[in-house]
Amino acid sequence: MSDTGEQSESYYVSSVGTPEYDRYWKYSHKQIRLGLVALEGIDAKKQQDDWDLDDSEEDDLRRYIDECVLVRAVDNFQAYVVELLSKIFSQRPEMIAGNKIDARAIFEISDIRDLKRYAVEEMATKYSFMNVVDLDTELRSKFAFGLFQTKIRKIRIKRIVEIRNLVVHNRGIINNTFMKKTGSRYDTLGTLVKFPHPVIVIKYLDSAAIDIDRHANEKFTLGNSINV
């Protein structure tokens, strides 16, 4: 997996993307700084007399930091996608016309603008429970809008998301669910999953977010997205 951002013909500056991308970008860089500070803390602690971890324990600690950064990076990416969809639905309410609304809300919310916001939030909440790969399939089917423009991008994002799920739900130990969902022949059941350095993952997700932002703006004219 490589950083494709610098290979793109054009690149976004964070301050001129959609506000949703801007929030995503800023949070991503906070995550990188957090990981660096944590690792610097380990290095500083090693210089003290009370450092009592052997090499194996130190490797475990460093991996734990990497896992934390990776998990938050994936969560941030998925939150960005849902926020962007909320904006799209707000500007194109006809896209959620077929979505059912709780009958109680119709009687409890008197202002039509508040009711529209409620409908958008309901739709976005529904999609927030889906991982971005399944969401890509759903959006293509319903709105002819895909999140990922190439098959390899979708495959790589799917693996990153499934690594996140494995870390959260099974301490990173490969199980049958992971093997089935990723379809990889190179993973070994019962072992710790391997993943690139979290900074590389963040850069790859950032590249994907840039493409999503550009594509969404071209299709729905969201504004505040330009190429430089």
Image (cartoon, helix red, strand yellow):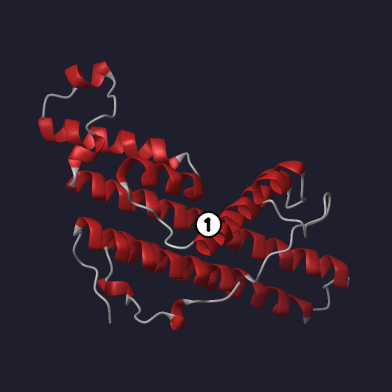
| Viewer-proximal residue among 209 and 138 | 138
Is residue 99 placed above or below 78 in the rendered structure? above
Q: Residue at x 22, y 32 (%)?
A: 97
Q: Is residue 95 above or below residue 26?
A: above
Task: Establish if 148 lies above or below 110.
Answer: below
Whole-percent x, y for residue 47 in the image: 77, 82
Residue 228, image quadrant? bottom left
Specify the quadrant of the image occupied by residue 44.
bottom right
Q: How many marks?
A: 1
Write the residue at 66% across / 64% down: 65
The structure residue drawn at horizontal position 36% and vertical position 61%, both measured from the top left corner, is 212
Residue 67 percent coordinates (x, y): 66, 60
Q: Secondary structure at mark 1?
A: helix
Within-10-Å neighbours for mark 1: few <14, some 14–19, many 20+: many
Image coordinates of residue 176 in percent, x first then y, are 76, 42
Depth order, front residue of 33/191: 191
**Location of residue 99 in the rendering, given as x and y in whole percent from the top left corner:** 29, 29
**Above or below for 152 versus 118:** below
Quadrant including the N terminus: bottom right
Task: Return the residue at label 1.
Answer: 74
Which residue is nearer to you in this view: 45 or 126?
126
Quadrant of res 208: bottom left
Q: Is residue 37 left or right of residue 214?
A: right
30 horizontally vs 178: left or right: left
Q: Amino acid at mark 1?
A: Val
- In this rendered view, identify the residue nearer to me: 40 or 147: 147
